[in-house]
Amino acid sequence: NAGVTQTPKFRVLKTGQSMTLLCAQDMNHEYMYWYRQDPGMGLRLIHYSVGEGTTAKGEVPDGYNVSRLKKQNFLLGLESAAPSQTSVYFCASSYSRGYSNQPQHFGDGTRLSIL
Amino acid sequence: GNSVTQMEGPVTLSEEAFLTINCTYTATGYPSLFWYVQYPGEGLQLLLKATKADDKGSNKGFEATYRKETTSFHLEKGSVQVSDSAVYFCALSDTGNQFYFGTGTSLTVIP
């Protein structure tokens, strides 16, 4: 039972470099989310998607882009990495709209350091 | 708007002590409420949930009751173990399936 899989698990970048974080889920969930987790700040929503081909901004979208070309995949891109983007990034997925009793399922995270 | 407030940590308890982590929420409508647990180096895992007022969620000895009158969903466990050391997050979900998380409470249980 894979659930939500994130790759890579760790990455170190230099300022200005770009990279893409991949999230894949095998639960046929409609909704997918990207969060960042920083000490003392809990989880903050970056972007989310309510279905294939759709994306929307969350609480802290600046400096990030996303794409949802396939239902099972949700990509998070950093075009020009900055030290402020050093964080742990979590992907999550959940069942479809209108079912507020459905939990989110999380991946194990990507630990990203920007030097 | 929707929000979740949970007690600040860190919390340190001796093994077999009673645990309470407070969580209160602000929401319009009828949200569902959740507790997640995060072990070191891992993602968040669902611990328990409650979907309507007066529901009690329970799992692994943890319990929480959805109290609409006090807008609370406090997490309790009667006897904690060292293996319960983790960060605990309270969360709510509205009908648009948007989640709102608390800032997390770190629990350390010492033998």
Image (cartoon, grey):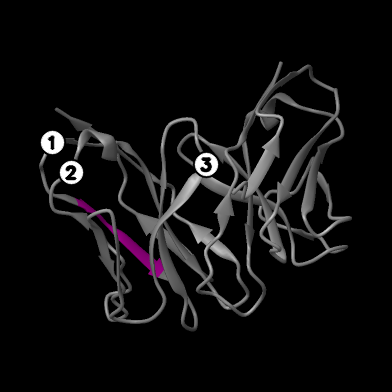
Q: Does residue B105 appear to the left or right of A100 in the view shown?
A: left
Q: Could you say where residue A22 lies in the image, as x and y percent from the top left? A: 77, 40
Please state which of residues B12 and A52 is positioned toward the viewer in this rendering: A52
Q: Sequence order check: which comes first, mark 3 or mark 1?
A: 1
**Amino acid type assigned to the residue bearing label 1 in the image:** Glu
- Are discs 1 and 2 less than 8 Å apart at CB? yes
- Looking at the rendering, in which quadrant would you find the C terminus of chain B? top left
In the rendered view, would you say A106 is above or below B33?
A: above
Q: Does residue B46 appear to the left or right of B96 in the view shown?
A: left
Q: Residue at x 82, y 39 (%)?
A: A77
Q: Residue at x 38, y 81 (%)?
A: B52
> What whole-number distance in Å separates the C-alpha atoms at marks 1 and 2?
6 Å
Assess whether residue B67 is covered by the magenta stretch.
no
Q: Sequence order check: which comes first, mark 2 or mark 3?
A: 3
Pointer 2 residue: B80
Magenta segment, which residues? B20-25
Q: Which residue is drawn at 52% across and 41% down?
A: B43
**Amino acid type assigned to the residue bearing label 3 in the image:** Gly
Q: Are marks 1 and 2 on the same chain?
A: yes
Q: Please tell me how crowded label 1 is: few (under 14), some (14-19), or many (20+) other residues with Cα within 10 Å.
A: some
Q: Could you say where residue B4 lies in the image, as x and y percent from the top left? A: 43, 61
Pointer 3 residue: B43
Give the structural element (helix, strand or loop) at label 1.
loop
From the image, give the main secondary structure of the stretch colored magenta: strand
Q: Identify the subunit bearing mark 3.
A: B
In the rendered view, would you say A34 is above or below A114?
A: below
Q: Do labels 2 and 3 share a chain?
A: yes
- Looking at the rendering, in which quadrant would you find the N terminus of chain B? bottom right
Pointer 1 residue: B15
> What whole-number distance in Å separates the C-alpha atoms at marks 2 and 3?
21 Å
Q: Identify the subunit bearing mark 1.
A: B
